[in-house]
Structures are given as structure tokens and as C-alpha cells.
Image (cartoon, rainbow, N blue to C red):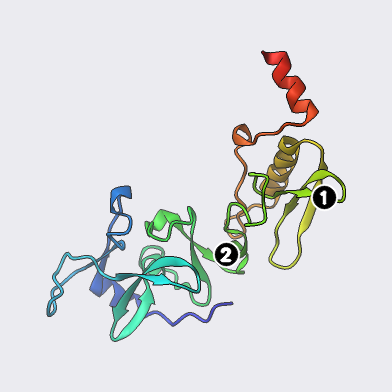
Amino acid sequence: MPNHKPLPCLSRLTELFSVVEIQPSEFGLCSGLIWKFSRGCRKAGSVAGTRKYDRRKDRYDWYVRIDHTSYVVARVIYYIVHKVDPGTSTVDHWDRNTDNNNSCNLRLDCTGEIQHKNVDKRSSNTSGAVGVTWHKASNKWRARLHSKFTPLYVGYFTCKKEAALAYNNAALLYNSGVCYRPLNDLQSVSCDCRLCSDHISNTQ
């Protein structure tokens, strides 16, 4: 579990910042926090925070300095809006866009599992479908849910679309606000198995 810095008290944060809605055209330009008053070269109404690249995570995040200490902006916004201190939990972005710090896009990852699963496809996945990989030994498509601790195998399928559907059904069964698994768009999953080929021939 990440050891996050304790945030300043809520009254201090609301004294310093206003939370604003970020439009898609402003992603990367606005952190979601605005300074409430001027100090030195900082002007009231200006964007609070700096967008920095984190090599360890291979992504950009917004950070803001408060009383000489740097904090992740997403955590500050979550605390101000929801009145809940994230504590040791990670604040995750639903759409995986760390520039989208709108409060509706933020959620707590209490167990660390969201961060583990919060990728559409692993680099080893050549199927183009979430949770579906080719299993060479069985000569079939394998569907499984990736857990932080151990994979949950759903089954083996000749048809890639069937494997993607089986994954979706299992993911829906296990999905929750804390442990969310992305789903496949079945219309975009292509398969050249005999079943799918016959279906295409019959519809032509």
C-alpha cells in the first residue's frame, strides 16, 4: 500500500482552493484547482499546481505545493469535494486520464487492486480483447480475470468473441466501485474462427 503524505486539514484546503470543472479542451492545462487569493507572483483565480512527468509510473500527474510540501492534486480535490481524507488509499482516475481531475472521475482504491487491473490490455495481449489471450498448449483463446494475488481463469474457447463475452460476464459478476475491471466492446472484437466465418457467410 502506498505511503501517501498526510494532507493538510480540510479547512486549510478550502481556504486556499476552489475546485473547478475541467473541460476536455483544458486537459493538461488546468489541474482542477484554482487559487482563491493572490500571494507574490501567484494570482487569485490562476491554476494551482504543476503538471509533472513521473518516470516510475510513466505518466503525468498534477502536484501542488502547500506550506512547502508537494501533494498530488487528485487527492486534494477528492478530499475537498467528498469530505473524506484518502489516507493511505490511492485516488484513482476512472477513465485512466490523470489530467481529468474532475471529482466525478476520481475514486478511492482502498486495496490497491484497481491500480493493478487499471489497464485495458497487457503488453503480452495480442488478441485485442481485454482479459483474453492465446493459449498455445490448448490451441484456444483463454479468458481470465487478473487479480492482484492470483489470476481467476474463466475458460478456454475456440472463438475469440465467446472468450471476450465470457470475460465480460465474469467481470460484471466481480465488478464493484472498489475493484473495477474494464469490459470488452464485443462489436470491435474480430475473430476468424469457423463459427464466426459461417455467421458472416450466412449474413451476406
Left or right, 198 with reference to 77: right
Identify residue type, mark 1: Lys
Q: In the depicted view, which residue is nearer to us: 98 or 92?
A: 98
Image position of 1 with respect to 28: above or below = below
Checking the image for residue 115, the label placed there is 2
Position of 200 relative to 110 (above/below): above
Of callouts 1 and 2, the N-terminal one: 2
User: Which residue is rendered at x = 68% and y = 66% of the image?
Assistant: 148
Query: For the point 38% across and 56% down, which residue is it?
Result: 100
Q: Which mark is residue 62?
A: none
Q: Amino acid at mark 2?
A: Gln
Mark 1 crowd level (few <14, some 14–19, many ≥20, 10 Å Cα):
few
In three-dimensional space, the C-alpha distance between marks 1 and 2, rounded to whole angstroms, equals 28 Å
Q: Which residue is mark 1?
A: 136
Please report contact status of discs 1 and 2: CB closer than 8 Å, yes or no.
Answer: no
Left/right placement of residue 80 relative to residue 97 reads left
